[in-house]
Image (spheres, rainbow, N blue to C red):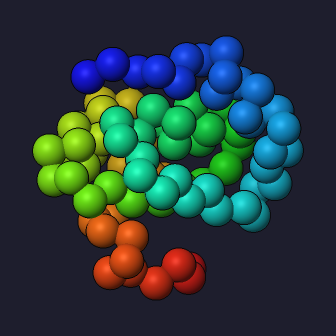
Amino acid sequence: MANFFDDRRKSLFVKIASFKTSDVLYDLGCGDASLLIYSVRHGNIAPAVGFENMPSRAGWARLLIRRAGLEDKITIEGDLFDRPLTR
C-alpha cells in the first residue's frame, strides 16, 4: 500500500494544527493510520480516532497501531456514517 502523505507533509500538518493536549484528532478515511500515528507521536495528542470503511485497510491500520505500541491512544472505527462524533 503506497503512502502518498509523507513525513514532511505530516510534520507540516502537526505544526499548522497546533494541537493542545485536550484535543482529539478524527481522521475520516484514515487508510493505514499513518497520519494518526505521526500526530500522536509528534503532536502530543491522545486520543485519536480513525474511521475506515474498508475492512482490509482498517485491519492493516490496527496492525500498524499495535506495532507502534499506541493501542491505548488510537482507535479505528468502521464506517463514519455508523458512528457518532462525540467523546
> From where the camera sits, is residue 21 visible?
yes
Q: Position of residue 34 (x, y in %)?
A: 45, 32
From this view, report whether residue 22 is shown above or below residue 6. Answer: below
Q: Is residue 82 left or right of residue 3?
A: left
From this view, report whether residue 15 is shown above or below residue 81. Answer: above
Of residues 20 and 58, which is closer to you in this image?
58
Residue at figure coordinates x 76%, y 55% from the top left: 21
Quadrant, the N terminus: top left
Q: Residue 83's image quarter? A: bottom left
Residue at figure coordinates x 36%, y 49% from the top left: 71
Residue at figure coordinates x 23%, y 43% from the top left: 57
Residue at figure coordinates x 56%, y 31% from the top left: 38
Q: Is residue 58 left or right of residue 65?
A: left
> From where the camera sits, is residue 47 visible?
no
Q: Residue 25's image quarter? A: bottom right
Q: Position of residue 64 (x, y in %)?
A: 30, 33
From this view, report whether residue 84 is shown above or below residue 10. Answer: below
Quadrant, the C terminus: bottom right
Q: Position of residue 61 (x, y in %)?
A: 30, 41
